[in-house]
Image: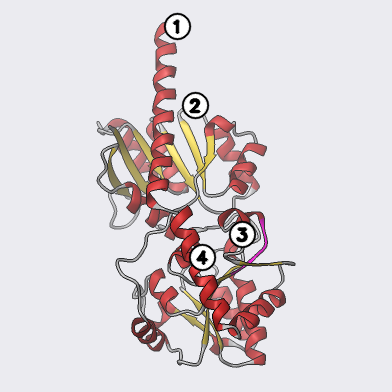
Amino acid sequence: MIRVLHLVGPDASVSTSTGVAILSRPDEQMRSAVFRIGKGGDFRNALSAAATLRFAPVPFDLIHAWDRAAFLAAVGSGGPVVLSIDTALSTGEISWLAAAAVPNVRLVAGSSWTTAQLQYSGVSPEHCQTILPAAMLPPFAADATVGAALRAELGFTASDFVVLAPGESVRSANHAAALHAVSILHVLNPRFRLLLWGRGPMTRGLKGLSNRLGHDHIVICADRVQPSRFMLSDLAAASDAALFCAVEPAPTAPIIACAAAGLPIVAFDTALSRELFPGDCVIKVLPPKPRVLAQALLQLSEDAVKTARLGQAAKACAADRFTPERFGNNYVSVYRDLMAAVSLQHTRMDVV
């Protein structure tokens, strides 16, 4: 049995929360514990976490780090480390990770696009691989009554066509393109509205952009309606469609969760959207311009049959490709390969 310590920084993303929830469940193949860095967590900061993990006896075989702060602490511990990467990386971050990818470190990217970036920058194929995120299905399917109640709580009317830009508003998610697309549609028909979670560093900028466009009233930030009240599954249940506007490696767990909830999706046609959603279960558009998104959304809003078909197709795709079982088994394989490599390294050192 592999003993894994999951180390999480202060601002856990949707991908992190989902991944940790799946991998820390009771399992015959591994035993897990979750430690957190930051206020109210197990460690005050990355430095204190590294010192504790290095000098205190910790009964774990490896550390699974889920963000930069956790990775710094994990590497400082001196033991085997797995790092999950689910978003775009700067040139400096890629170079730093390439240097950090020593034999006892494995980098796991959330898309082949990110894996290719890492390998191009010098990370050996043996030290990095791709594991697509998983979807955690809600305990029950939201019916029309639940969805209507959530819409009313968020401030939408029954006639609104609610477009969700899912997940945290980070740069790589490109929620500005969603705002531009819905602004175009709102001019044609005031029933088009945009729903944001209201989390992430770009949220304030998006609100400012909506003000400059003169469309502040079309944007609803769920966390501003009631902080920490709404989960991503709630936002999906309250929406009519979702937009995936990333044109670079970006967090994918939020849009996968929308697919699992049966929400029809419009996405830019990129290597990332094709990898996540092969075939025609998602509307993929080119060129990556807001007006093209707006056109696809307008056509979708006028065709209830197509909307229902796309929602069902997205849900079937998620159920087939993004299962917790597949996700967990793939990570167990990474853990085992890393432990075998570390054991072989120690054997060679003993021989020398």
User: Label 2 amino acid?
Assistant: Pro
* Callout 2–callout 3 Cβ contact below 8 Å: no
Closest to the camera, between mark 1 and mark 4, is 4
- Whole-angstrom CA distance, mark 3 to mark 4, is 10 Å
Q: Nearer the viewer, residue 154 or 75?
A: 154
Reading the image, the residue beneath label 1 is 352
Reading the image, the residue beneath label 2 is 103
User: Label 4 amino acid?
Assistant: Ala
Residue under the point 65% across and 81% down: 299
Secondary structure beneath dot 3 equals loop
> Which region is colored magenta?
266-270
Closest to the camera, between mark 4 and mark 2, is 4
* Marks 1 and 3, the one that precedes in the sequence: 3
The residue sitting at the right extreme is 287
Reading the image, the residue beneath label 3 is 279
* Marks 2 and 3, the one that precedes in the sequence: 2
Question: Which quadrant does the N terminus fall into?
Answer: top left
- Whole-angstrom CA distance, mark 2 to mark 3, is 38 Å
